[in-house]
Amino acid sequence: MQKKIQLPLRIEDIESLKAGDRVLLSGTVYTGRDAAHKRMVEQEKEGIPLPIELQDQVLYYTGPTPAKPGEVIGSAGPTTSGRMDLYTPALLEKGLKGMIGKGYRSEEVIASMLKHKAVYFGAVGGAAALIARSIKKAEVIAYEDLGTEAIRKLIIEDFPVFVINDIYGGDIYKDEIAKYKQ
Amino acid sequence: MKKIAYEQIVEKVKTMCIESNYNLGEDVYVAFKNALQTERSETGKEVLTQLIDNADIAKVERVPMCQDTGTAVFIAEVGQDCHIVGGRLVDAINEGVEKGYSEGYLRNSMIYNPMNRTNTGNNTPAIVHIDLVEGQELTLHMTAKGGGAENMSALKMLKPSDGMEGVKEYILSIVKEAGPNACPPLVVGVGIGGNFERCAFLAKKSLFRPLGIRHQDPVVAELELELMEQINRLGIGPQGMGGSTTALDVKVELESCHIAALPVAVNLNCHASRHQTIVLK
């Protein structure tokens, strides 16, 4: 079954999602990967306000290829989320409600997601040309000097993801791998 | 003596960078289609379908199939009877990479220094391995190697007493630990023997061999098939979301080593297994 969800995330949507669900996301997401996370958390410690309001928002871990002339964005698939684990609990504290990436999260991040009622979505790693079709607008809004790692505001339409971790402790990696192990 | 011009190498390398990122090789495409027939998980089938659609879109629209357009890795087989004129081979390769990544709108992922982490802005330096061979030709093998899968790669100096069972166990443990992070379905490159640095190279070199092509030594070929079966029983599946397709292929390269040693390297490659070969003569 495929669900359609409008972003930013509302609590009733978060509550309706279960690990393993196929979801099409539409609305606004912000990109951010390694260098942007490091800078956000460092600035936060120094008392500098974050460049984006994170309440109810979703972060997409991606570093797109340069857009060809006339295109909104280049290819833009998910990068490995685990590299952001060190910084994620601090962002969940600030109201972040969802993340899109690929791969395992640490126990600490999962615990923090449960505490703050946030979900982790997985997009298909490498499906970057397909995913780019669902990105309708892209605008660099912070850390332009970081190039592909700058924070972009994206307007997405029917962006295909799977729910990896829900707010009830469901985890697609743990649950599904066990099913097919021989 | 055959002369090969610097500029000719630059142009060929440029084309290899662009084409490898836009066009998924037929070998990988066929492996996706075959996996779709045998995959048991519905989620796994959906992932494989997205990957096939993605490859079609990238080819038709001439855009990179993956946003991680990789580190450009080359194995250059230089015929000892050819003469490269107009500059150094490595400079020509780097200039080709710079042109290819810029003109092809590919992502620049290389940084000057792991400590200060400033992007070089042109995806150089390429990693270049040079092999001097017989003849007058220059053969360039290229792969655009993704960072996610490379990160989950590993090497271990086993003890000779660990034997083949120890080797297999180690390879499986690395694939298991990588789980969804390395973008399965994977191509698993294995190096056995050599020494510390040679072993890692063997694992990388194995990834240049097209999917579905077995090692010429039947004993090694059998080992590849056995490892593939064991890996596909782990249940990791496409994108680690569960299923029966964890590896599209397993490649093993093996060489002599010291009596005290049993080095094993596992170089994981994501499903975007981009590899190309051209011959200049």
Image (cartoon, coloured by chain):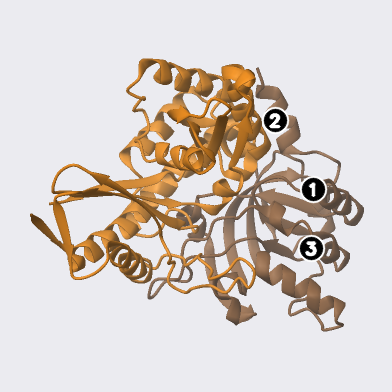
Chain colours: A brown, B orange
Indicate which disc residue A106 carries. Answer: 1
> Is residue B265 toward the left or the right of residue A20 in the image?
left
- Mark 2 is surrounded, within 10 Å at the Cα level, by few (under 14), some (14 to 19) or many (20 or more) other residues, namely many
Q: Please state which amino acid type lies under the numbered disc 3.
A: Tyr
Residue at image mark 2: A176
Residue B171 versus residue B57 in the image, above or below: above
Residue A162 occupies quadrant: top right
The number of callouts visible is 3
* Same-chain status of marks 3 and 2: yes
Q: Please state which amino acid type lies under the numbered disc 2.
A: Glu
Toward the viewer: A106 or B203?
Answer: B203
Q: Please state which amino acid type lies under the numbered disc 1.
A: Ser
Distance from Cα at disc 1 to Cα at disc 3:
11 Å
Looking at marks 1 and 3 on the same chain, the residue that comes earlier in the sequence is marked by: 3
Callout 1 secondary element = loop
Callout 3 secondary element = loop
